[in-house]
Amino acid sequence: MLRAPNLSLTKFRSRSLAVLSAVDMAAAARLERPHHHHQHVVVMRHGDRLDNIDRLWPSTTPRPWDPPLAEVGQARAFETAKGLPAQLGFPIHRVVVSPFRRCVDTALGLIAGLSAPDEDPDAVTGDGGIDPSKVKVSIEYGLGELFNNIAIRHPPPCPEDHADWGFNIPEIEALIPLDALDNTVKSVSSKLPQWGETEPKAKERYLHTIHSLADRYPSENLLLISHGEAVKVTVSTHLEDTARFKIKMDYCGYAQLRRQIFQNGESSVAGGFELVGELWRNRHPVLAEDADVNDTSRGTSLKFF
């Protein structure tokens, strides 16, 4: 009859300790190995502004440089919110907004659209889009309009004097639901740009603001509601062979950036941003085939919606 080897208790303990030691070392190695995730930043243009619909409106208001959304713009923001879960596929944790009223109204329309019950039984829910019960909203001067008399049609009498613009952050914050407002955030820019801002200067400002906000919240996905120039900068900076295209952005159109965040303990390292996904207009992506490639004498016109 075969008998099992007679191992001493000492040898058994030794082998057990060796096995446990190997397991512990493997576990420790896994803990020390940095893990990564993707951070998403969505840069969106505001909805349709009132002075583009009602041409007489500027003559009826003391602040013609800061139009609200038109009714059609409110509807567009609301409708855009309905499509976000399917289009994004990831949650938005934080919304940062230009202080101009049309951008604030767009943020409010998006939140309202996500808060309203969806009558479509096939509507996509889950991890995509904005959860109004969890998202935090703040105001950021660095996302404001290109600050010159080309982009701003009806500036105040003394545009160089920031006081003349009448932006009051507490008053703007009062428009945002209390459960969504985060007024503890320190702005990247604490004031408006210098009047007469050039496009290169605005590009520098927008990119600095986008990167600063992303670096401040590396574990969060951000929705930045700004102006057409900001979305144009986002696309042109990250689009290959951008000189071939004339970039146009529709109301509530947006560009999506993504980067990897490598986490090791309490420290993190960010990779570079890339432009990803489709650019959307009311649930419908505009594909490359929709670009106007007929007039090559003026370069290709690529419209993002």
Image (cartoon, rainbow, N blue to C red):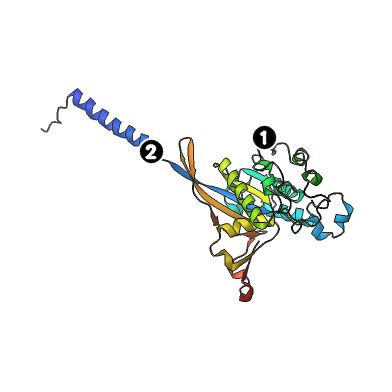
Q: Nearer the viewer, residue 253 or 274?
A: 274
Q: Which mark is residue 272?
A: none
Residue 13 higher or lower than 27, as above or below: above
User: Residue 156's x, y, as percent?
Assistant: 82, 51
Name which residue type carries label 1: Thr
Q: Nearer the viewer, residue 144 or 92?
A: 144
Which quadrant: the N terminus?
A: top left
Q: Nearer the viewer, residue 1 or 143?
A: 143
Q: Is residue 120 visible?
A: no
Q: Nearer the viewer, residue 184 or 283?
A: 184
Exactly how many numbered labels are in the figure?
2
Q: Secondary structure at mark 1?
A: loop
Decide which of tag 2 and tag 1 comes sooner along the chain: 2
Q: Secondary structure at mark 2?
A: helix
Mark 2 sits on what residue? Answer: 30
User: Residue 256's x, y, as percent?
Assistant: 59, 54
Disc 2 from disc 1: Cα separation: 36 Å
User: Residue 104's x, y, as percent?
Assistant: 73, 47
Asked whether the residues under the numbered discs 2 and 1 touch, taking CB atoms below 8 Å apart as contact, a structural biologist would say no
Mark 1 sits on what residue? Answer: 184
